[in-house]
Image (cartoon, rainbow, N blue to C red):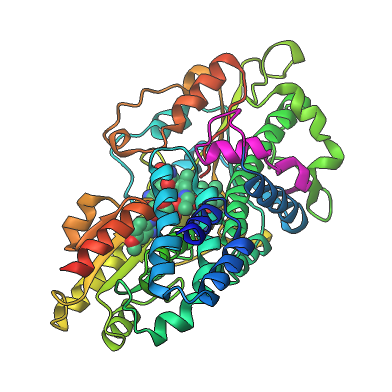
Amino acid sequence: MELLNQIATSLQEGDDARVGELTRKAVAEKIPARQILDEGLVAGMNVVGSLFRDHEIFLPDVLLAARAMYAGLDVLKPMLVSENVPTAGKIVIGTVQGDLHDIGKNLVGIMLRGAGFEVIDLGNDVAPEKFVETATRENAQVIGMSALLTTTMTGMQRVVELLDAKGQRGRIKTIIGGAPVTAEYAREIGADAFGFDAASAVERVKELAAQ
Amino acid sequence: MKEIVRFPVDACLPTAAEVLAGQGVPAGRPTAEPVAESLREALNLFQELAAPITVVTGIPSAEFASVYRGEGRNAPESPLAAIFPKAEQLVLFAVTIGAPVSEEISRLFATGRFDLGYLLDAVASSGTDRLAQKLQEYCAVRKQERNSPPGHEQVASCGLRVAGDENPLGDLGVLGGSTSVSGSAGRAQAGTVFLRYSPGYCGWDITGQRQLFRALRPEDIGITLRESCLMEPLKSISGVLVAARPEVHRFDNTYPFCTVCTTQTCRSRIAEIQDGKPRKHEAG
Ligand code: B1M
């Protein structure tokens, strides 16, 4: 559909004003919200994702596109709720206790929202108990943790241990990432997944949410 | 003796090309106009909000040995352990561009301007790294001009020195980024090169921050250390400036920890002291 293609193209160009305007137009033309989302916004974001993976574009371009996606999502949100369109899943994210570096975590959150997840962002310097309590209360499938330094990433292990102690470890999955974090460290502490970057984090979270 | 050195914001303002290169964008590649516009905005915000300030203090080798030992968690062998005993001079340092830039980054993310927030973060990281580089150059110039090591002399009564006032940054540029104080400029000690080393790199465990902070007390310029060894403001760098002959700074990247190092910035630093051409260092 021409209008949905235009949404996808404007999104790739990072033109948030135009994406908002075209999405409103699509809604006015009574195109179902789900279709606008899938064939307009998500389709555009998928192209952006593959251009990024092929190093055709870079993170700042992706963020502009994501901003445009949000402009469209803002228009669609009330309809997605009223049409009962399910989210891809729910995830609680945060930067671990003692750590304030949240740019990586923010990027992961932005990409996850763009992929249709409901994201509860606890911010930075988050205590292990808060991760577990929030995920339990909100019935989230995944907890995502980020850290900048080897001294702060130890907080991730505490979250896994707490989940274990509360018998929630199988139900609530964990994904970790950040500059000093490795796949090996994730295995060592019993985290369910490791995200090398924001794009791979989205792939891993999709897998975890599907389990 | 401790010395506080301030730099004008322009001294640590990165170029747009530098910031893009840090994002992996190949040199010469055209930038999409919206990205270029956000980057200009980010550079302007940095100029408006950054408050670069640094502190240095000279330290005798024996005392530094105990700072370096830290909490005993360093790698059994490391480049710095071999380098510092051969140094002509050791100067502890800390630099920061202050908290307002980080506060603005958080505000931008919270209000949905994450493209700008992200670019401001990248500008601020490059800027902090540049500030450390400028301090390194300043120390080299001071040593060359007076053969008087920074942090080893009486400072002005208020304890503040504005680098831009006494050593115009244009002068610093004469030396080039390598900070080599050898050769044509008639240095006091021919062949001496200042290079910086930081806890968290090359086998110097990050917990070494605690000893370093005890010896330097960068709280005077507003840098504090959390229990977790994280510095606040976030955009801060600490370490030791080592003045030594170029060959003393050279080492192979064959230590066990080199295999997991993703930055390998030591290679460009070593190449730089070899050919005297400044290169961009990755932050941290
Ligand atoms: C939930 O699931 C997930 C999944 C994926 C997830 C995730 C969660 N969270 C993140 N991801 C992933 O996706 C994101 C998007 O791709 C990524 O998020 P990041 O947050 O990693 O990425 C950001 C978007 C951009 N990346 C960054 O901002 C970090 C890049 C590197 C080069 C870096 C930078 C830029 C800086 N630093 Co420095 N710095 C390094 C870094 C080395 C590296 N190559 O990563 C690192 C983190 N630094 C280090 C060090 C030692 C330090 N730094 C310092 C300072 C600095 C700068 C100020 C110069 C600058 C900014 C720091 C800041 N936090 O704002 C100091 C500490 C600062 C402090 N406040 O305490 C200092 C301690 C040095 C010193 N003594 O002064 C090292 C830590 C080593 C350790 N032992 O912990 C380091 C790994 C470099 C190294 N040695 O290789 C992925 O990690």
Judged left or right of residue B274, residue B54 is right
On the image, the x and y values in percent for residue B54 come to: 68, 49
Q: Is residue B73 magenta?
A: no
For image coordinates 50% across by 48% down, the residue present is A59
Quadrant of residue A122 in the image?
bottom left
Q: Which span of residues is magenta-colored?
A: B1-30
On the image, the x and y values in percent for residue B220 come to: 67, 61
Vertical position of residue A14 compared to residue B190: above or below: below
Q: As rendered, which of B109 and B155 lies closer to the eye?
A: B109
On the image, the x and y values in percent for residue B148 come to: 73, 31
Quadrant of residue A167 in the image?
bottom left
For the question of whether residue B228 can be seen, the reply is no
For image coordinates 38% across by 43% down, the residue present is A53
For image coordinates 45% across by 30% down, the residue present is B266
Q: As rendered, which of A195 and B262 lies closer to the eye?
A: A195
Vertical position of residue A119 compared to residue B34: above or below: below
Judged left or right of residue B169, residue B266 is left
Judged left or right of residue B284, residue A146 is left
